[in-house]
Amino acid sequence: MTSATDSKRTPLYDVHCQLNARIVPFGGWDMPVSYSGIIEEHLRVRHHAGLFDVSHMGEVEIYGPRAEAAVQYLTLNDVSELQDFQLQYSALCNDSGGLIDDITICRLAADRFLLIINAGNIDKDMAWIQQHLPAGAEATNLSDQKALLALQGPSAETILQRLTPAALPALAYYHATAARVADLAVLISRLGYTGEDGFEMMVDGQHAVALWQALMEAGQPETILPVGLGARDTLRLEARYLLYGVDMDESNTPFEVGLNWLTKLDKGPFIGRDALIHAKAEGVAKRLVGFVLKDRGIARAHYRVMDGDTPIGTVTSGTMSPSLEQAIGTAFVPPAHAKIGSEFAIEIRNKAIPAEVVRAPFVPRRVKR
Amino acid sequence: MEFPEGLKYTKEHEWARIEGNRVVVGITDFAQEELGDVVFVELPEPGTAVAAEGTFGVVESVKAVSDLYCPVSGTIIEVNTDLEDHPELVNDAPYEDGWMIVIEASNRAEFNELLSPADYQSYVENEAGS
């Protein structure tokens, strides 16, 4: 669907309007930023459950006899040990080792892989994949056909279990299952972007409304709320998950943003490997750290990080944490300032507000391990 | 959406309650609804001189930073320090406990530039929003 202004809309647009959502343009999409309010929605996810429409995200299937080799070549993490219906967090890099996108990969079969990619990068990623796909593999962009809903919070399993015969207690973190939910065909993945237990559900677009309504109704005893992109951002920042285009872009290597762990330099050839081997040997010039403010103020994207009178870095993400009631943020700083406990200042409207580097995550993650 | 009588308004979505030379200032119901949850308010010290249409501080929601504009010129004589620990008062009671500053006005002629409740409501409904 498109609006008069050429903004794209998910199949749930009318539902969001009926729920009085505040709709804002987001990367070419008209999306709900909030319904009842960002703080209320955020806290409901932390304490009970929230339902997100993330259908704007992209889905690409890579299939064929050499699909695994293709995915291995295109991405940073190692897919060779994945079992069917197992997922992993990964990334696409260019030849210089710069991050093109952060993605989630689900192995559906030895010859079929599903990539979940950021909404703002669908065209870019698809063009890159088509350009670099080795022989023996094909790629299809399923984004316009699929809807994606996220149910997140400590009550998520209880709620979803009412609607599916799949045995959810046995569904492990970063694993998926194809199951009926409210008698609809759904790919259920146990993961999310909030730091809470939860599920992301991929369904054909024509079934999105039915799935949404079923989940909202099933979640009433647990006081489920619809949750918009505003709370999605505060939740992910509290959990220290990265946001592409805000925390990193093609000018960043995975090492600068703490993605060393998924950069498998020994797995065999992949795009960017040589540059990344070199970058690792050289060491990073800056690192992304998390900090809290020690005095009144809120750090925002692009605010300067100061060491006395010397600018040493830049804030990428910042907000007032609804869970902690404290100002938190992430910033690029030189490695010497990146240790836990390091102190610097954030320049907020010409005042230097003291800040301290803290461990990730800001709020403990409660994903099911 | 509330547009109380007895107040004057500006196109920047501030309200002013005129009590002789004292002008109590805050942001309107429309403004707080547009902002969403207010999480931080930055106000100047009493004694600060201000000019009509200049900024006197900042109100921050979860997602955004917005300037606050003076409806009239003068000197700030009172500041609502409750907003430091309870910024949500701006959302819950924008015209009462969410008041922000009191200005000792230096030019009463400026009062004539302010909008009536009806004019402000008309502005909000036709120009400023949906």
Image (cartoon, rainbow, N blue to C red):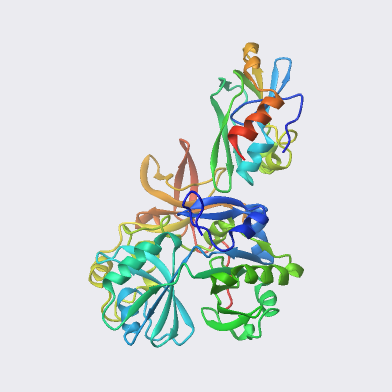
Looking at the image, residue A312 sits to the left or right of residue A178; the answer is left
Quadrant in the picture for residue A279: bottom left
Q: Position of residue A167 (x, y in %)?
A: 64, 86
Q: How many marks?
A: 0
Instruction: Answer whether residue A323 is visible to the viewer in this image.
Output: no
Q: Return the residue nearer the eye: B6 or B105.
A: B6
Residue at x 65%, y 61% (from the top left corner): A226
Q: In the depicted view, which residue is nearer to us: A367 or A182?
A: A182
Figure quadrant of residue A282: bottom left
Q: Position of residue A285 (x, y in %)?
A: 30, 57
Question: Whole-percent x and y of residue A1?
Answer: 51, 60
Q: Camera-side residue: A205 or A189? A: A205
Tell me: residue A92, above or below residue B30. Answer: below
Which quadrant is home to the C terminus of chain A? bottom right
Q: Position of residue A42 (x, y in %)?
A: 63, 58
Residue A113 visible in rendering: yes
Taking the spot 62% from the left edge, 58% from the top edge, the residue there is A14
Please name the residue shown 66% across and 78% down the image.
Answer: A182
Picture quadrant of residue B51: top right
Question: Relative to residue B19, is residue A63 drawn left or right?
Answer: left
The foreground one among B84 and B38 is B38
